[in-house]
Image: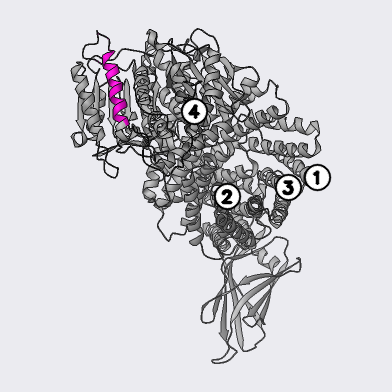
Amino acid sequence: MRRMVNGWSSRMLFSNVILLDIIFECTNTHEGGGTPMHLVDLWIMETPGSGQAKLYPLTHASPGRWELNGFIEILADTDAIDCIVRSDEEEDVGFLRLDMKGIRSTRVSSYQELSRDIEVFDEETRLIMRWKGVETSPERPQIEDDVAAQFNGYAMDLLRAFERTGDLPLLTESISCVRQAVDITPEGHSKLPVYLCNLGCTLMRRFERMGELTDITEAVAAQQEAAALIPEGHANMPRYLINLGNSLTSGFEQTGELSDITNAIAVQKKAVDLTPQGHACLPSRLSNLGCSFGRRFERTGELSDITNAIAVAQKAVDLTPLGHADLPSHLSNLGGSLTRRFERTGELSDIADAVSVWQKSVDLTPEGHADLPGYLNNLGNSLTGRFERTGDLLDITNAIAVLQEAVDLTPRAHADLPGYLKTLGASLTRRFERTGELSDIANAITVQEKAVDLTPQGHAALPGCLNNLGTSLKCRFKHTGEPTDIANAIEVQQKSVDLTPQGHADLPDRLSTLGAMFYNRFGSSGKTADLEETISCYKTAAMSTAGPPRAKLEAAHLWARTLIRHRSQSPEIIPAFDIAIGLVAIIAGLEQTLKGRYTQLESTSTLALEAAAAACALGRPDKALEWLEQGRCLVWNQLNNLRTPLDDLRIQDEILAHNIADVSKQLEHAGSSRGQSHVDMPLSEKMSLEDEARSHLDLARRWDDLLRKARAIPGFESFLMALPCSAIMQHLPESGPIVVININKRRCDALALLAGLDEPLHIPLPNFSIKTASDYRAALDSRLRTNHLRTREVEDMAALLEEARGMRPAPVKKRRVDDDPVHRVLRGLWEKVVKPILDGLGFSIVDQSSGEGLPRLWWCPTGPLSFLPLHAAGIYQGSDSECGFDYVVSSYTPTVTSLTDRVKNHGSIDAKAAGLLLTSQPNAPGAPPIPGTTKEIRAIAERAEKNGVRAKKLEGNEISIEACLEEMKDFSSVHLACHGSQNAAEPLQSRFLFHQGSLELGTILKSNLKNADLAFLSACQTSTGQEKLADEAVHLAAGMLAAGYRRVIGTMWSIGDAPAQQVAITFYEYLFSHRDGTSGAGFDGTHSAIALHHATEKLRLSLDDSEHSFLTWIPFVHFGY
């Protein structure tokens, strides 16, 4: 019986005749006679038959001899064949009729050479046709090996010809030949796995071209059988596995069946593992594995998949020599994975690298190559992605050009054409959104409709094509208002959603798009049903179990915003924001570098503030507090979690506590030390970075696993989870309230946290707004720029005490003192923010002459208010003058938790470490000299010695960066009198400038400062912050808190050299004189807030009320406990 390969069937071959080794020989009847022959073609017509001739090319092998490459198959129902030999002048040279019945009657059993004379029209010429024939009869199944090998060899020749030309009949004939090789090869034959594997490969190539699902099904079946027939350890096993994996991946792309891609990855990983280093096939096997990881990432959104995809794809490229035919393919696969990660993380270097490698793949591919359209499509897609990020119009113009070329080069029946049309349509839509050119959106809709029409029903790509078409129709509707466009958009988008399987990574985004369409129609129709559908779509998208976290976050945000706008008292606002805020920590997860996390947070910087405003409007100050704590200062909170004391957990499970401590240290190091890829970086370095990224991701996964184990222990269910309000309200300082001020476009509110209360005291601020805060900030910033307050500089202190004072003379027109912008800002903050809060708390002016101390108050501002001096708010002229200094001692805290953690963990400092380290760096390279820093620390050291305080003074070159870090471990307090530099883009590269280098914040964070207590940053702009990340506290003061210091003195803007000396010396005089008598030579910063209040007020009272004077004393601020 003939073999059946997993259910696929082919023509019965056993009554057919195969003509092999066909040659034509010419002999002349007499020397010099006859006309010279130039044979080129053999035409065959069968009787009975269709009447159509088959053409077989002939090759001139030697003088008077021509050969036919391959074979001719004569079917069982053919009685005779007519053979016509033709010349290069397209003339018939000779004719032969073969009686197939007669030939069959000879019962050919093996190769048997037969020959017949050709009837030649030139009587002086003799032409003979010779061949070997095989009859494939049921009685004789054992065929000579060479027959099947001939079929297989011919099939591979045809496949290679197809690869060069893209001519589909060549591929069809190749499949037929290799299928026959399989059919005539008996079970157990050593070549059978080879033929099965080749059959699978040829079927897969046709599937890639035509998209017929039966082809990929047969391909997988054949390759599974081939792999099953290969014994373990066989040298060819990796080849069969990789081909099987490729077919499974292609099947997944067609059907979306997740098990296919999972199985593909499993067999491809095994193939790679079995392939020796240095093997010629290793790069292609790595590249294929990378593709499969990328495909699964598209489906599930699992970040580890795309990290693995990039790593193995980069290795494939690195192992492929320049000039190798496979290099363009490997580069293309790498570019695809980089683009997918860019779409997830927004990392600009990824899309830049993707454009670069795809351009290279195009440049290396010759004109006419079958893969060129695919590479052009990929290049266009990456250029579009970069345009969406940078807005560079040249990128989208180039994208459309190369995408159009890809479409033009692709045959209409090609399976990839719908995908290319879809990409072209999306790019045209992007350009329309930028330029408003109606021809772009019209063309986009046309090509996307064509993409939909060409995509078979049931194809996995159909929902994506429908989604893009719907998006384009929606865009045109927004431009023209044509009702049919939005109706059609909703119809196709609904179909896209219905066809997208549950658990698909794209489902949340497609649901959100559908919701936006319903909302667009609601805007024009006003129909409640459309609003209901909008809310339903956003809600379903937000609550999806799968999909990119950012897509779900955006859906939850839209859900909440829609409710606020149309149903402001809906209880669903709370769960909507709960989901959104919870996802912020995921999009900026521990697997990313710190820079990557900050980049992710830029787009969500106001989410927590918006949520808190909604909670306040609903009368839920408890939720407002929870969301502000969960959604602000995320990176510092992550670092704080990594440094959480584990004493209680260690009692329950010492090994688990040890593992958590170990992984936390590794994660902290990876987040701050891992480099970033860039276009010009050598590939070997990029590979190294990707290896680091994979290790980083593995650490993050292990961290999550360890947290799950800890939370399974009774009493640790909420270990390192976002705290509920009741937990946040614990461990509040007894000495005064914490006041969180939320600023949002909708409303402004203060939340006062007082020890003993169960929830925050809600104090609305109806007279303040985010616009007012922004205006105040702009006014203050303008004055700072005018006064050149950017670096600590030498100032004439005496000049500050005279009538015309200032940090540096500036061309400022004269104005009344109470009319200058700084005074107006301070008055506005007092009247609209600070005084209403103090009144709400019941605070009154304290008569300090009676000896009564001022209460403490910790400000926790948000948004643009973070850049304004709340501690200095007040009215400073006239009979009604009053200010915050009269009511409270002000401090700041980035978050409530960062302060309450210090209250909770207020352990004693090791007596051996209690003391003060002082360093001055007056002449750092590249910075203006600040000689006052030397005087400053000498004066402080002198006073420390007089008061018996342990202190150490190191000036300029006396201390290196490394030595400073070691000294900081030995002293609980540090005073850094130097230039400071904030790096908003890379916060952990913010630094203090020393003579021998830079002391970076990231380096300090890595140090184990167990006894850190007080850090006095007598430098400029150490608490300035960064506008795009106002609620991430990306400044040196917050960084020193994160490094473990309990309290930090910083500056809001640049400070003068002389005022800095005065404040610092007065500050320490107060601390030294108010030491606990039992502290011996020890020293701590317990009274540091009061000391700074005292020092600043003393400076303020020594100056007049001019604007320049105010800019001199205001910047000094206290952070922490």
Q: Earlier in the sequence, mark 2 or mark 1?
A: 2
How many angstroms separate mark 3 from mark 1 (CA)?
10 Å
Q: Do callouts 3 and 2 mark residues in contact (Cβ within 8 Å)?
A: no
Q: Secondary structure at mark 2?
A: helix
Give whichever of discs 3 and 2 has the lower sequence position. Answer: 2
Dot 4: element = helix
> In the rendered view, would you say 27 is above or below 711?
below
Label 3 secondary element: helix
Kind of residue at disc 1: Pro
| Amino acid on which the number 2 mark rests in the picture | Gly
Q: Earlier in the sequence, mark 2 or mark 4?
A: 2
Position of residue 3 measured from the top left corner of the image (x, y, whole percent): 62, 47
Earlier-in-chain disc, 3 versus 1:
3
Indicate the position of residue 526 as horizontal and vertical percent values. Answer: 80, 35
Q: Which label lies toward us, 3 or 1? A: 1
The kind of secondary structure the magenta stretch mainly shows is: helix
Q: How far from the left and from the top, in percent, is residue 696?
A: 41, 34
- How far apart are the two marked residues, 1 and 4, measured between alpha carbons? 53 Å
Q: Which residue is mark 4?
A: 826
Q: Where does label 1 land, which residue?
A: 483
Q: Earlier in the sequence, mark 4 or mark 3?
A: 3
Q: Is residue 894 visible?
A: no
